[in-house]
Image (cartoon, rainbow, N blue to C red):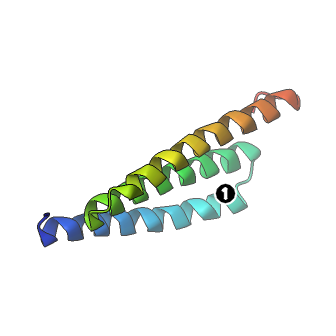
Amino acid sequence: MMPTDLSEIFLAAAAAFVVLAIVMFYRAVAGPTTQDRLLAVNVLGTNTVVILALLSVALEQPWYLDIALIYALLNFLMAIAISKFTVERGGVL
């Protein structure tokens, strides 16, 4: 059983990452170049994994880590697919 103070710290860190995700979502929508948008979407995926891991520890729900792992794998596959599509279209990002 985790002390409540430590749990609150993890929840606060998760909330901070949610705020950063909102800022990164703005960059994904308004990014001036395709590279900015791709990087922002990739960072959003990584941010989601970190948020899920922090929530897993704070709420003592280990199955959140399973979801985080699956999401990380999907994020990686998405990055590979987008990179392959961009290179085949004619440019290296």
In which quadrant will I find the N terminus? bottom left
Q: Position of residue 20 (x, y in %)?
A: 47, 62
Vertical arrangement, residue 60 with respect to residue 80, above or below: below
Callout 1, which amino acid? Ala
- Is the residue 72 above or below the residue 54 in the image? above
Q: Nearer the viewer, residue 61 or 90?
A: 61
Q: Quadrant of residue 91?
A: top right
Residue drawn at x 47%, y 54% is 67
The residue under label 1 is 28
For the image, the number of numbered tags is 1
View extreme (right): residue: 89
Residue at 60%, 44% in the rendered image = 74
Q: Quadrant of the C terminus?
A: top right
Residue 16 placement, left or right of 76: left
- Nearest the eye: 66 or 81: 66
Q: At 35% across and 63% down in the image, what residue appears?
A: 55
The answer to which quarter of the image holds residue 86 is top right
Of 52 and 61, the residue lying toward us: 61
Residue 21 x/y as whole percent: 51, 62
Is residue 65 toward the left or the right of residue 91 in the image?
left
Q: Residue furthest front?
A: 63
Secondary-structure class at tag 1: helix
Left/right placement of residue 81 relative to residue 55 reads right
Residue, x 30% and y 68% (percent of image)? 11
Circle 1 packing at 10 Å, graded few (<14), some (14-19), many (20+), is many
Query: In the displayed structure, does residue 25 sit left or right of residue 6?
Result: right
Picture coordinates of residue 53, whole percent (x, y): 37, 54
